[in-house]
Image: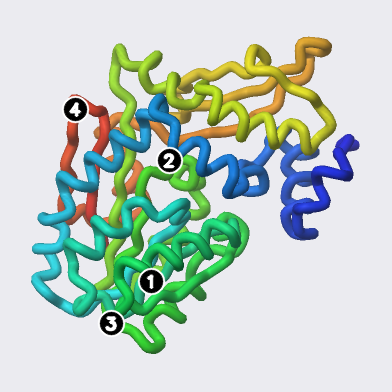
């Protein structure tokens, strides 16, 4: 039986509450998608110690011209999954040009995030057509988003997943991404990789105060009053996952998984994508920041 903090869980929809309770009861896991709010995300985004975002943004900047050249001025739609605060969007639109992006679909589970991102696009790119999808894609997938984006858009969809190893760790979602690609569609990814000897550096971004504040928000939903020392992290090389756990000091027999993020080597990433039948168009590895950027289709 889950001991919910009823005053805090009031902000959750019935759907989110169901996801939370089911995950706790079945897996002792708190899904990050029911935890984060705009307030916590902004704190993380502005934290200078959050090096992960800088690494993946650097990878995007390094590859974006090559990505745009791949499409050579063709009309496209962009479907940006887990858009967050949308910091990458100006880089993407500048590279492809507003005139070539027919629909820019922003997708997130947080309504405040979507509203802020939509406003930012409108201010910088007033002629860019934006479609907004408030959707839990880990539960409902993205097929409807891909279809609706094409209804009044271009014939080519490019699905973007940037700096989101949490979403990419979900095998069901990655399979759904593949199934949602039609002939001529593409999937673009940036991802932090695992690199021998870099465990502490990789883990560090997940145990800084701004991230722990977010994770503590989830723990509070189930009736605990956590402190930073009760969180631990590890990299499971067999599962290719970084995992963050919470164990209350008063009862170390309890252990909740509060975050997991996919951290493969480049070789393991390639094997995974091949096993799911993705065709690799190109992949670039940036060893100094243990990050990669890749483009796939069917």
Q: Disc 4 and disc 3: Cα gap in Å? A: 35 Å
Callout 3: SS = loop
Tag shown at residue 287:
4
Viewer-closest of 93 and 247: 93
Earlier along the polypeptide chain: callout 1 or callout 2?
Answer: 1
Q: Earlier in the sequence, mark 4 or mark 1?
A: 1
Left or right: where 121 falls relative to 246: left
Based on the displayed image, in which of its 4 quarters is residue 180 positioned? bottom left
Q: Is 87 rendered above or below residue 248?
A: below
Nearer the observer: mark 3 or 1; the answer is 1
Report which residue position mark 1 lands on: 122
The numbered dot on residue 155 is: 3
Disc 1 element: helix
In primary-sequence order, the first of circles 3 and 1 is 1
Read off the residue under disc 2. 165
* C-alpha gap between disc 4 and disc 1: 36 Å
């Amino acid at each position: 039986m889950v001991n919910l903090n009823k005053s805090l869980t009031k902000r959750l929809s019935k759907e989110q509450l169901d996801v939370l309770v089911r995950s706790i009861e079945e897996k002792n896991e708190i899904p990050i998608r029911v935890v984060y709010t705009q307030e916590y995300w902004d704190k993380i985004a502005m934290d200078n110690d959050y090096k992960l975002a800088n690494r993946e943004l650097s990878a995007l900047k390094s590859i974006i011209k090559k990505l745009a050249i791949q499409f050579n001025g063709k009309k496209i739609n962009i479907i940006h999954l887990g858009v967050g605060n949308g910091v990458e969007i100006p880089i993407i639109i500048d590279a492809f040009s507003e005139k070539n992006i027919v629909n820019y679909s922003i997708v997130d589970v947080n309504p405040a995030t979507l509203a802020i991102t939509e406003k930012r696009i409108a201010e910088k790119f007033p002629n860019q057509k934006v479609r907004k999808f408030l959707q839990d894609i880990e539960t409902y997938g993205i097929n409807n988003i891909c279809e609706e984006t094409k209804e009044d858009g271009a014939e080519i969809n490019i699905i973007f997943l940037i700096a989101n190893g949490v979403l990419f760790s979900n095998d069901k979602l990655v399979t759904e991404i593949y199934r949602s690609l039609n002939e001529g569609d593409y999937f673009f990814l940036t991802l932090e990789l695992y690199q021998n000897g870099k465990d502490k550096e990789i883990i560090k971004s997940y145990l800084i105060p701004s991230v722990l504040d977010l994770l503590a928000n989830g723990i509070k939903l189930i009736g605990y009053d956590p402190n930073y020392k009760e969180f631990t992290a590890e990299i499971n090389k067999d599962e290719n996952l970084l995992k963050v756990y919470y164990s209350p000091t008063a009862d170390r027999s309890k252990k909740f998984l509060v975050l997991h993020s996919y951290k493969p080597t480049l070789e393991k990433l390639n094997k995974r994508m091949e096993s799911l039948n993705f065709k690799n168009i190109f992949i670039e590895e940036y060893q100094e920041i243990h990050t990669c950027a890749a483009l796939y289709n069917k």
